[in-house]
Image (spheres, helix red, strand yellow):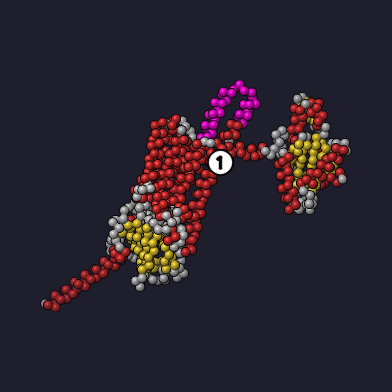
Amino acid sequence: MQGTKLAIFFSSNCLLLLLACATAFAQAPQPLVIAPGDSDVPLSPHIRYHHDSESTLRPEDAWQHAQTRDFAPLPDGRDAFGFQRGAFWFHLPVVNQNPEEPRWLLVQSYPLSDRIDVYARYPDGRVVHHAGGDSLPFEARSVRYRHPNFQFELPLDTPVEFLVRVESQSSMQVPLRLYTPKAFTELSRDAQFIIGIYYGILLALFFYNLVLWISLRDASYFWYLMHISAFGLVLFTLNGFGFEYLWPNSPWLADRAVPLSICLALIGMQQFARTFLDLPKRWPKGNLVSLALIAFFIVWGIASVWLPYRISTPVASRAVLLGVLWIAIASVVVLRQGYKPAQLFLLAWGMFLLGTTLFTLVAFGIVPKTLVTEYGVQIGSALEMLLLSIALGHRYGVLRNENERITAEANQQLERKVAQRTQEVRHALVQLEEAHERLRDSSRRDGLTGLYNRTYFHERFETMLDECRDARRPLSLLMIDLDHFKSINDQHGHLVGDDCLRWAAQRIGKTLRPHDALLARFGGEEFVVALPATDLRTAVAVAESVRQALVADACTSQELRVSISASIGVHTVAADAMDDIDDAFETADRALYAAKANGRDCVRTSITAA
């Protein structure tokens, strides 16, 4: 009997021991195995965490808690927890089975965490500790990069336990990843390139609208520039570049820069909206609300210098949504009043509101962090600023058209020429970019004939001369002078003379069209032609066809028919000649003089002139 009881007792204890071992095995975290060839390993699917709301847990206690149910898997695999008090602990054992990569970087892909402590415990009991975050100088990081990073040795087939403690007054976002040095270099290169494109867009918009503001002195452009600058500073800070480049040794400013830049951006936002939508005139009550918001952002920005980060930043982040939403409401109200520029304005702020909403929802841990949600604010703000730039041009065009309509009505009795010029100014202002191009082109052309002028011909001929020398091809030059043109002016008047010049320019241009020629009015009744890749014989033939085209018909002006002929001098610059532009013109001019001396209405070359 006694033996039976003893056997039962022994069996019961063994069963309890087996259950305890099974429970411990079930609770023990499974290590993350880095397979051969892995270079970028996300830790969120494998990591376990514990929220130490009072920030009282010590590292040695956390090691023990990591083996119990106090540490749990991330909820739905999400590594964003919103704004939380206290500290968060994360635990993960890792086994490196990649024989080619013993050195790894642990990267926290969120730049605004205050303090990050990373402990790595090796099988021999050795613990390696690294600290980072924007509460420490930037130089404390293993690699100078905007995201906190820590370098560790992971020996082959050796289990290493990681314990990470994160404490921050900012949003608690802990996207942890392991990278090989090569993978991290490629990641940082690609990320810097993408963000560089974004800031390149901002800089292009800034300088473009700066020029417009200097030229037009429209207040809307000034407040738009402030909006671009301030919001660019916001993202520069949120992306960690401010701490990296502007204040690397000032953790205090790294914290304060976030709410301060947000408030500054909101002030610029509201003031720009007030000016663009003309709220003081179109919606006075809404204008008062905008002024009240501006006053609040000014006060909150000043107060954020003293307020704790955990208070100032969440309020400023929520205020972004409030400010953008109010601008959207004001846009709808003004749009319903028939103000058409508000259409693009509303669309722009809709893009910005969407991107900002995604960013804010990630900050509060409501939606998961993906490529779209992480960079939603950059995408939305880039689209918003592009559309706002277009809206500014459209608004300016609308206001300009209104002013021009009033001016046109007040000046209906003015002569047609003045009205025509006013229309040209209106069209040039509506088509601002096209006006720039037309202005540049008009400086190259002769006002009477529409041909290129002498200055442009000189510039282009030098280029053609260099090109023909490089290609070892000749370049021919024709000097054309209308015969006895002074007598046409003296006999029929300058208006008829002008008609004759225009007619001659058209006839010459039509004849030269198949020859890829450059035609310009050289002055008075003289024209000049450049024929690239054309030898002297061909150039003479072209000149003769021009001469015959002029004498084949007569110019009709004021019911008069005026016969016109021309003397033409031809000179060809050989491919190996060292003549400059002055030599070429002087030689062609001598050939022209020879044509005049030989009775006019003929073609002479530089060879015959000699």
Q: Identify the image quadrant of the C terminus.
A: top right
Give the farthest residue toward the right. Answer: 598
Measured from the top left, where is residue 213 in percent x and y?
A: 53, 39
Q: Can you give x and y, in whole percent of width and height, for residue 182 in the image?
A: 48, 63
Residue type at tag 1: Val
- Indicate left or right for 120 with 27 as reference: right
Quick one: quadrant of the N terminus? Answer: bottom left
Judge by depth and name the residue closer to the eye, 79 or 267.
267
**Can you name the residue that lies furthest to the bottom here?**
3
| Residue closest to the far left | 1
Q: Residue at x 41, y 47 (%)?
A: 260
SS at mark 1?
helix
Q: Which residue is mark 1?
A: 211
In the rendered image of this protein, does residue 248 appear above or below residue 2?
above
Query: Is residue 148 visible to us here?
Result: yes
* Residue 507 shows in the view: no
Q: Main secondary structure of the magenta part?
A: helix
Residue at 72% x, 34% y is 449
Image mark count? 1
Q: Is residue 414 magenta?
A: yes
Which residue range is magenta in the image?
395-424
Question: In the picture, residue 409 is in which quadrant?
Answer: top right
